[in-house]
Image (cartoon, grey):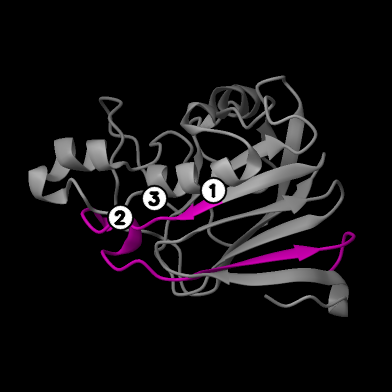
Amino acid sequence: MTDTTENGLVYEHEIPAREPWSGIIKKGQRFRLIDTCGQQAVDTLFYAAADTAERYSAQDTLQAQAAAYITTGTRLMSNEGNVMLTVTDDSCGRHDTSAGACSCESNTVRFGHHTKFEHACRENFVTEVTRHGMSKRDIVPNINFFMNVPIAPNGDLIIDDGISTPGSYVEMVAEMDVLCVISNCPQINNPCNGFNPTPVGVRIYEGKTA
């Protein structure tokens, strides 16, 4: 971790492949996720720091945007109808919020019994939310930053090769104090991580310009 005020940067951290992370982003701060190596899904949840009962809502976000994907201009909505963060810059182009997080159970159903004990995002989320007084009951449908999930003509979600390249980023401004919880996805059975989980970067800046 780096703690510096250079160019407004107040926090910098690299999340290792397959690992979780959490941190507070204060109202007005800018939060940047960096896909360091490309083709890495970053499963993400947001909670109101003042009351974690208020948290990111995929349904409210999609309804508010009338769009299937998250990108520049998207307002990330809470289950209380409040804007939690606004996406202000996005070099990737789109991000999924419909396919959810992998788990040991879903891996077993989708890929076979031999995957039952492979590490998964839901386990990362459980590990991290318990640090903030929550439990698995508080894990809701998440954002999959950088994950490429086309929608087939019949409505099925297809997990496809990632479109993000090394250094791709997405940046958002916090509209309230938020707790961010991340699982740097460990999935190796579908192409969401290019079958090779890699590190990602997180940065928090003060103010409007870096």
The crowding category of the residue bearing disc 3, from other C-alpha atoms within 10 Å (few below 14, some 14 to 19, many at least 20), is: many
> Tag on residue 11?
none
Q: Please tell me which of labels 2 and 1 falls first in the chain.
A: 1
Indicate the quadrant where residue 176 lies. top right
Residue at 29% in and 51% down: 160
Given residues 46 and 61, the one toward you in this image is 46
Q: Is residue 119 left or right of residue 84?
A: left
Residue type marked 1: Glu
Tell me, for residue 187, which label it has, or none.
2
Lateral position of residue 130 relative to residue 122, left or right: right
Task: Judge whether residue 71 can be spotted in this image.
Answer: no
Q: Residue at x 9, y 50 (%)?
A: 114
Q: Is residue 167 visible?
A: yes
The residue identified by callout 3 is 148
Indicate whether residue 22 is drawn in magenta.
no
Residue 200 at what x, y percent from top left? 52, 68
Q: CA distance from mark 3 to mark 2?
A: 14 Å
Which quarter of the figure is the N terminus placed in?
bottom right
Q: Secondary structure at mark 2?
A: loop
Amino acid carrying mark 3 in the image: Asn
Of discs 2 and 1, which sits in the foreground? 1
Q: Is residue 203 magenta?
A: yes
Residue 136: % across, % down: 47, 32
For the residue pair 203 and 68, the one nearer the viewer reads as 203
Decide: few, some or many residues near mark 1? Use Cα within 10 Å; few <14, some 14-19, many ≥20: many
Residue occupied by mark 1: 128
Q: How many marks overall? A: 3
Q: Cβ–Cβ below 8 Å for labels 2 and 1?
A: no
SS at mark 1 in the image: helix
Region of the chain picked out in magenta, as a range: 182-210
Q: Residues within 10 Å of mark 2 (few under 14, many from 20)?
A: many
